[in-house]
Amino acid sequence: MQDWQQQIKQLQQWWQTPAGENMLRIENAFLRSELNNVFGYQAVIVGGEEYSQLTNIVRTSHCMRIDPLSQDFSHLPDKIDVMVLPHMFSFIEDLTPWMQALLAKLETNGKVIITGYRYSSVLGLQRLLKCKAVADIPTAKHNVKALQQHFITNDFQLAEEMNFAAVWVRKRLSLFNHQLNNALLGNVFAFSMTKKLATVKTFKPEWQVNNIAQQSSVLNSVGEQNE
């Protein structure tokens, strides 16, 4: 098992605590609202059993869930219209193989939805104060801006971003607000990226430019130089 998979497993264990269960419930509610209006041919959820109910929400011809602890990008189907990647991209050091797989498998204008925990948030403040409720959340290798940049440099464009779930009660994590869009201290980040249409750049051949410049010195058919 790779290091990032160990961290996902650690996160799954935290989701079984009261604070983790609340956080996961809020995130799933957000993802259900996002996927409720998705249409197309193929949808993929890359997540554990905690996200299995999302497969019943998507209005596509086909929807499948890939368990990140036992399957990798080689299991992705073709012609994907929407993919949900909760948390795992925060922990993978080298995202290149996954980016290449997304570019190969995702349809043009296909959507990728990414979620993760923000440490510049109420959650991060509680971690800094060593609050027991959040002590077992693994540390991410990429923050939200770094993840977005990975996608942008691989021909994706940002479609939407928001932060939500931001309520702090002293000595414990309390998540009464199911969603606080663009909350400054939101514990959870979410953003979606769409795959750009591939464009072919055309350049004027260099030989054409040189030919025009030297046209006056070309000899004609009878050996006389053109003026």
Image (spheres, rainbow, N blue to C red):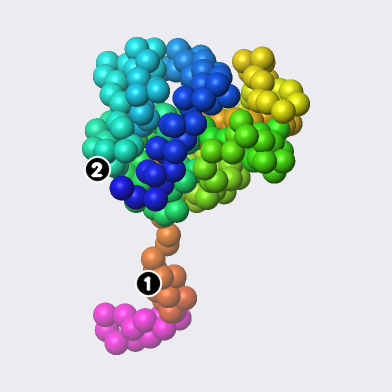
Nearer to the camera, 131 or 167: 131
Residues at discs 2 and 1 in contact (Cβ within 8 Å): no
Name which residue type carries label 2: Ser
| Disc 2 versus disc 1: nearer the observer | 2
Residue at image location 26% in from the left, 19% down from the top: 62
Identify whether 83 is placed above or below 153. Answer: above
User: Which residue was labeled with disc 2?
Assistant: 74
The percent position of residue 18, horizontal first and vertical second, equals 55, 21
The percent position of residue 127, horizontal first and vertical second, equals 66, 40
- Magenta span of residues: 216-227
Nearer to the camera, 196 or 212: 196
The percent position of residue 144, horizontal first and vertical second, equals 58, 42
Residue at image location 45% in from the left, 53% down from the top: 93
Residue 134 falls in image quadrant: top right
Q: Is residue 13 left or right of residue 130?
A: left
Circle 1: element type: helix
Mark identifier at residue 207: 1
